[in-house]
Image (cartoon, grey):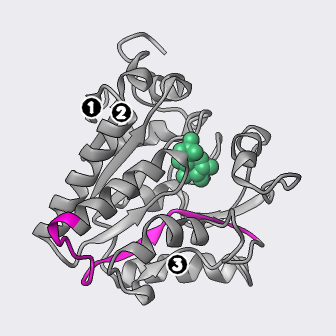
Amino acid sequence: MTKAQFQVFPSPEAVAGAVASHIGGVVRTRPQTVLGLATGKTFVPIYEALVRLSGETGLSFAEASSFNLDEYVGLAPDHPASFRRYMEDNFFRHVDLPAERALLPEAGGDAEAACLAYEAAIAARGGIDVQLLGIGRNGHIGFNEPGSAFDGRTQVARLTPSTIAANTSDFPAGELPPPEAITMGIGTILDAREIVLVATGAAKAEALTRAFVALPDRDCPASALQQHAHVTVFCDEAAFAGMGRPA
Ligand code: GLP
């Protein structure tokens, strides 16, 4: 049985406000917080709410650090669909988080070396305090696709056809997502002291049920979160709809 706490809201906007205020509270209490950040459509309104909160209340990230979950292999940082670009556009350039402490995996050169360097950089900061996570329709977290080991570290992952299809709309017309990405492993994610998973929309209902109602299973990477002692799921009613039913 999962120890995860669920917070259910009527709309994605309400979810975004609640996640922003939770993260704001964490950073206010501990300005040196090490954040684990996520990308994806789910997080666009969340960063918007966090930027608004920062502007309205003076919430500062000047002493914080961040590590993103993942980055596509082979995309230039300024490619319109790179996660670096996403983070710059949606969050980094609107807040005072120092650029040298806002890290994503370096997916442009020697990928294996970049994976080791990323793990070392996280450890050197003392580990991640709060990891934000979305969930793929197939239950992936970061780019840890079904079948990934629950103790995996930062690695090069191959995207499944369903993930490539789900993310194609983020790319310019006629361009497909790269087949590989560097992602924190599930073991890296589970090392975070707190995990905040966000799911909105009916398309995520089945993944949420498989992650938290069924027994942990490598076929659903997010089900590894059942092993973690401090997980909060922020979701809307549409994503929550299947919970309580057997997976
Ligand atoms: C992407 C990312 C994940 C994200 C997921 C869902 O592939 N690697 O970190 O959680 O897909 O994204 P979305 O929020 O767009 O549904």
Residue position marked by numbered label 3 in the rendering: 118
Amino acid type assigned to the residue bearing label 3 in the image: Tyr
Label 1: few (<14), some (14–19) or many (≥20) C-alpha neighbours in 10 Å:
few
Q: Which quarter of the image is occupied by the N terminus?
A: top left
**Which residue appears at 54% of the width and 59% of the height?**
185
Residue nearest the observer in this picture, 233 or 83: 83
**Which residue appears at 45% of the width and 83% of the height?**
121
Q: Are marks 1 and 3 in contact (CB under 8 Å)?
A: no
**Is residue 64 shown in magenta?**
yes
**Which residue appears at 75% of the width and 72% of the height?**
75
In terms of sequence position, does the residue under pointer 2 or pointer 1 come before the other?
1
Q: Which quadrant would residue 215 be assigned to in this image?
A: top left
Q: Are marks 2 and 1 in contact (CB under 8 Å)?
A: yes
Residue 5: image location, x then y, percent: 24, 34
Please provide the residue range marked out in magenta: 56-73
Label 2: few (<14), some (14–19) or many (≥20) C-alpha neighbours in 10 Å:
many
Q: Which mark is residue 91?
A: none
User: In this rendering, does residue 201 appear at all?
Assistant: yes
SS at circle 2: strand
In terms of sequence position, does the residue under pointer 3 or pointer 2 come before the other?
3
**Which residue appears at 24% of the width and 83% of the height?**
63
* Whole-number angstrom distance, CA of label 3 to CA of label 2: 29 Å
Residue position marked by numbered label 1 in the rendering: 6
* Whole-number angstrom distance, CA of label 1 to CA of label 3: 31 Å
Residue nearest the observer in this picture, 174 or 107: 174
Residue position marked by numbered label 2 in the rendering: 235
Residue 10: image location, x then y, percent: 31, 25
Q: Is residue 22 above or below residue 90?
A: above
SS at circle 3: helix
* Whole-number angstrom distance, CA of label 2 to CA of label 1: 8 Å
Q: Which quadrant would residue 53 be assigned to in this image?
A: bottom left
